[in-house]
Amino acid sequence: MNPELQRNLWLEASPFRLALILGLLLLVFSATSIAPRGLMTTPGAALTLYWFFAVLWGTRSAALSVVAEIRERTWDGQKLSSIGPWEMVWGKLLGSTAANWFGALLCLAVLLATGGGGLIYGVILLAMGVFAQAVALLSSLVLIRRNTGNWRLDAFLCQVAGIGAAFSYYSLWSSIPAFQRSGTQSIAWWGYDFNLSSFHLVSLLLFLAWALIGCWRAMRAELRFANGPYVWLAYLFYIAVYSAGFEALIGQRLHIPPGFHPTTSKLVYAGITLLASAYSMVFLEPKDPVRLRWLSEQVQAGRLYRAFLALDCWMLSYAATIATGLLLAVIWAANGSDFSLTVLAVLGFLTRDIAIFVLMRGRAGGRGDFAALAILGALYLLCPMILSGSHMQGLTFLFLPTQPATLNLVAAWLEAGAATVLALHSTGLINRSRLQ
Amino acid sequence: MGYTNPMIEIRDLVFEYPGHRALAGINLDIVDRSITALVGPNGAGKTTLLRCLAALETPYAGHVTIDGLDTRQAPRAIHARLGYLPDFFGLYDALTVRRCLHYAARAHGIGTSDAPGAADKAAGRVGLSDRMEQPAGALSRGLRQRLAIAQAIVHHPKVLLLDEPAAGLDPQARRDLSQLLLSLKAGGMTLVVSSHILAELEDYSDRMVIVDHGRIVGGESIALKSGARLRIRLAEPHSGFEALLRAQGAQIVEATSGQALVNASPDPAQRAALLKELVQAGFAVAEFAEDSSALEDVYFARVKADDSGKPGGQP
């Protein structure tokens, strides 16, 4: 047996705990079966308790499977073990949530047996539970790289991320009837119609697969394996293609101007997704100044491939966003559209914002990311509000993508240049005197 | 350094934290089947050095090779070859000693059928055989330390790294620890131990490395365990003093023109011969005696000499 799974089973799935869960569930379902109509039904109770065991409590167990190792100072021992990254991931994911799954599967069985849903519904619930826990585990593996030192907050944030992922997906699922074509029970993706339930299930399973791949990749990094950029690039390609496929569906709902060619619309959706990934990853990843200096030295020494292999996810997301944006700008410029200037300005503001994250990380360490968020909040919300209140709306082009396009473009890249110089200075890439 | 069989080779090792260079070009060889003590003030870089040796941290520059493997290129293969006890270690308190050791054995690649035997053997080596069914959380500080060491050695690593293993232990537990470390060395392990407790290093260490400001003070390790040490003091300083000692084959721990500390031969005849050579060479020997309390003197003398050699250091 996987030693990590076995250790977790020893700790988490004691006979006493399992008997307690079984006893409580028997009591609950006995009560609901004899309760008067109008109160909680047995399928309703089973669904609620499934959410509790698999998502609410399960995400906490999954997050603690890593965070508690840091808290208890046993993580170094695990990193030095011979357990492989995939073995470690599924050992933790299944082992730490063993008691949760014992309760959740009992609830799911009751739900399906009492007519609370069909087989596909059951599979979706099952996949959603694993997805939530995998996101919580992945979040914990990302957070420990930030070395916050606050395990309670870390565990809570990971739990929130897992619950958020499950609820987002559940909400999306619930809202899909509003988007579907009338009466067809199908969904359009890349111009093809797909059965709604099947599309939903396959999408969930694919995102679950990516979450597990993310866990595996993050665990590899913890266990000192070199990851390389290819898996993240593949993920970026996947989410870009996935989101671009909804161009017609979302375009109709959001009343996108008909002047947008379908191809450029797809690129816009892909670009927006990549932009979101760039902002997410630059916030989540450490942006270690020492690592940035090391990368710079590799580039200066001509070891470009070695530097490429060591690029962080936020760098790859940024590069992919810039490439997609430039492609859009070229297409629109060829068609004589002003959108080309706007998209270049967006890239400028993105560059400024990335530099602000790097700058603040270099100055304030782990807290710098929150300081950077505050600065961005001021730049995108407070400053435009103040300008509006002062009847100087015309100057908002200084802070966010807007008209006039040419001035907006110039302002964005001037700010990007200034922020980049400051960021390079703070990381020691320009001035090494900060290093003692 | 002249070793023919170094188990650990460190070359130009540099490690940086943001805004701070923790290791500033360490060069060191550690010979197979030896115990090397890392000493130095808090923040000197000892723990960072041990973590680099354990391939838990990636150096900014330079190389660490363990058993011929580079920590940057083959960290997992190195992990399989070493055991590491951090300064603040943790245990799975809810598990029994047996299960802790069984898990450690399985996690280090020992098969299901062999794991119970490996756990029993490791427990036996640290004297925990009679505590196998106790939860780790119920053990005393000294016993927890033993369990942590047992977990680190359950897979018979070639190299064992211990960060402040004696911290918080009572005198008896420290003595037990010294004996355990010596027995592990006798069993074929190479040990690197960081410690603040200089007085006890001589009980088990072969060499001492003083780390300060991310560098090795004096640039090399100091031989410790070759029997007793002789303190030789001259009535008047003589520039050829150290050269003569070297010519006589004395293992010098430290030397100035006026005094020296050397590892003494256990053979009285050889000691007499050394004294005779000194006197015949015209050195005015004022003191020639065993010195059992000189390690701290060596440490402070080296650190002071190193500080005075640095820009802005104490003269």
Image: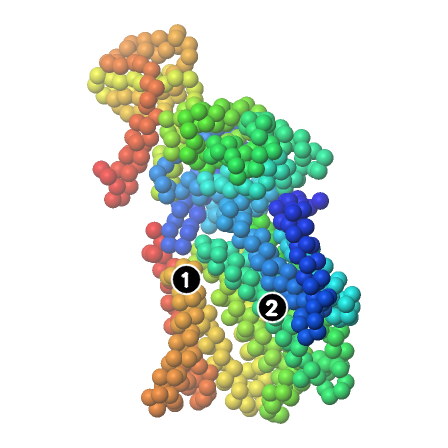
Q: On the image, numbered disc 1 is attached to which residue? A: A367
Q: Amino acid at mark 2?
A: Ala
Q: Is residue A98 above or below residue B47?
A: below
Residue A165: which disc?
2
> In the image, residue A112 lies at what x, y percent?
76, 66
Q: Is residue B215 above or below residue B246?
A: below
Q: Is any atom of residue A282 visible in this view?
A: yes
> In the image, residue A261 lies at what x, y percent?
64, 88
SS at badge 1: helix
Q: Amino acid at mark 1?
A: Arg
How is the structure coloured here?
rainbow
User: Badge 1 local density, few (<14 within 10 Å), some, or many (20+)?
Assistant: few
In the rendered structure, which disc, 1 or 2, sits on the residue that comes first in sequence?
2
Front position among marks 1 and 2: 2
- Mark 1 belongs to chain: A
Q: Is any atom of residue A98 visible in this view?
A: no
Q: Is residue B248 above or below residue A65?
A: above
Quarter of the image with the N terminus of chain A in it: top right
- Mark 2 belongs to chain: A
